[in-house]
Image (cartoon, grey):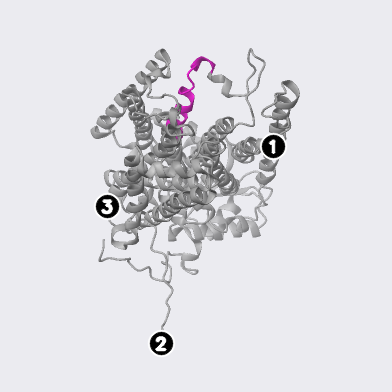
Amino acid sequence: MSKTYEYVPEPALVKGNHDFKDITAMVTDINMRPTPTAWYVAFGISNILMLVLLVSIAYLFWEGTGIWGLNQPVGWGWAIINFVWWVGIGHAGTLISAILFLFRQGWRTAINRFAEAMTIFAVMCAGIFPAIHVGRIWVVYWMFPLPNSMAMWPNFNSPLLWDVFAVSTYFTVSFLFWYVGLIPDLATIRDRIKSKLGKILYGTFALGWRGSNRHWWNYEKSYMILAGLATPLVLSVHTIVSFDFAVSIIPGWHTTIFPPYFVAGAVFSGFAMVLTLMIICRKIYGLEDIMTVDHIEKMNIIILVTGSMVGFAYIMEFFIAWYSGVEYEKAIFIIRATGPYAWAYWIMITCNVISPQLFWFKKLRRHVAFTFLISIVVNIGMWFERFVIVVTSLSTDFLPSSWGYYTATFWDVITYVGTFGLFFTFFLLFLRFLPMVAVSELKGVMPQADPHNYDEETGEYVPPKVQVPEPYNKTD
Amino acid sequence: MDRSTSDNKLYGILAEFRNPKELLDAAKLMNSKGFKNYDTFSPFPVHGMDKAMNLRKSKLGWIVGGHGLIGLVGGFAMIYFMMVVDYPLNISGKPLMNIPAWVPVLFELTVLLAAFGAVFGMFYLNGLPRLNHPLFNSENFKKASDDGFFVCIESEDPQFETSKVETLLKDAGATNIEKIYDE
């Protein structure tokens, strides 16, 4: 029964035989090439969708929230569903950039810039809904602690106010984190770009970064502190979003499992969104050596883990509803699975609980097209999760006499569709004008960056002693 | 270039090295020779450079801590003023100073201010933004953000002597040495 164990090193983070110059060129040339026609086409479509959003918001302001399908007792509809969905998607960016940084996961460097950009634009889309759903838009500033004619202040005991602080802090901190990461890469483009305007703009935003190691010393400290701050922040944001529900007494909402369950769901949907975008971009921009199949596999494992957590939470909700002995609580869960919205419930279960379980198979985890499909399925499932939570609990609350069926209207749908226009407009601008991979960080995790990998005498590069095996050639 | 002959002030001597290891060795050498006003430049932070250059611990932690404290105390003062002093409002019979319910907002404000401290404190410690710098006069220095590794010894250093520094850098293995002038 003797068995020899061998040290199995991590597969190389950057595939192919690239040096620092290649990496710089591979990423930043995208920003310096003439704009491809396909980009204009995609940008045009996104702009049209964004216009749809603006028109639907304008009509909402003109006509009031009556244009939506809201009724009594369903006073929260698509606006809140979309808000939670978008803000949840954003969470993956912070998880990749902050939590994986603290865990020293070198593979995050290939995708963190990308995911952080997604976070910022997703939070922008999310932020629109609480702002426009208030009904009396002209007094929207009452959400903030600003002096007003009533001499009153917002209620600091209310989760709805906590949410205002949580989401705005989250947006600001994510943006700062993203910008700090961008500074060295903006300097790289500043030094390479030919056009005068480009030199001025990139030069200004690079703040005169010179790559000084005295600067890197403070910079790395700052980056680590920001990661340390963003980690509890991201957990707090979706926790507070879940408080919007959990602090109320509506059956199906008033549960202590909500904070961890919401955070797991957020990470689950966010990783799926990162994969959707990444699989398209690595293909179009030829970044397959940087965003490798190994990255896709690692992300799929996180989807599997968080998907299982979400599935566990669904089961636990049912159990606790029965165990609590509260009639309303028990009834709502039975109604969810068998009542008028059973179709939504079973879409949710299929997409969120069953589909990620396929990632137990290594072949499927490393299959790019299959991953792309699942990443979209997961986000559909997560949208339905929020639909089930918001709508079923409200439409069938304590009094059967007030039960009603909620249907979205045309305006509900196109406001949601329009947010994709906003998201992709910004995302395409990001792809066009900013380096989509953190170049300096990526160089830092290459074996060439480690001074130990150079010969003591000649100073020539010597690849690390342990030969890195090519992983799983047969399945690729 | 005619800069060298004009009356422009010499800023320092810039030397290029081939790779992170040689840069690290050069930094160790500069440190052991007792140079004070020198710096190394690389497209990414080189592991171990802080020890090689004998850099002191960054003060950023204190700045962040201070800002976080301002966020916490300032947030508490704001909420206390609004909920207890200025417009006390009885909300379902709960105490006016309902501290547990204030925790989420206090936490967010602490993080927000601390993050501002982390970013702008880093800019402050690094002297950024600084859009003009003598080093930008060097065409070769543009590689510092791509794949170039540089050491610069500034003329302000008490031990600075052009010929001596040039020989030292050449012996350390520099591939390209140039004088940088302040315009």
Q: Which residues make up the magenta segment? A: A123-139
Amino acid at circle 2 = Met
Q: Residue A370, which numbered label?
A: 3
Mark 3: secondary structure: helix
Amino acid at circle 3 = Phe
Quarter of the image with the N terminus of chain A is: bottom left
Disc 1 chain ID: B
Q: Are marks 1 and 3 on the same chain?
A: no
Mark 2: secondary structure: loop
Of residues A254 and B99, the one nearer the viewer is A254
Q: Which residue is mark 1?
A: B72
Mark 1: secondary structure: helix
Is A404 placed above or below A246 here? above
- Rounded to the nearest angstrom, the CA distance separating label 2 from label 1 is 61 Å
Q: Residues within 10 Å of mark 3 (few under 14, many from 20)?
A: few
The percent position of residue B147, horizontal first and vertical second, equals 43, 50
Of residues A318 and A359, the one nearer the viewer is A318
Viewer can see residue B4? no
Residue at the (71%, 34%) spot, across then down: B98
Is A85 placed above or below A60 here? below
Q: Is residue A136 magenta?
A: yes
Q: Residues within 10 Å of mark 1 (few under 14, many from 20)?
A: many
Q: Residues within 10 Å of mark 2 (few under 14, many from 20)?
A: few
Quarter of the image with the C terminus of chain A is: bottom left
- Rounded to the nearest angstrom, the CA distance separating label 1 from label 3 is 47 Å
The percent position of residue A55, horizontal first and vertical second, equals 35, 18
Please report whichever mark, 3 or 2, sits nearer to the chain's N-terminal start.
2
Amino acid at circle 1 = Leu
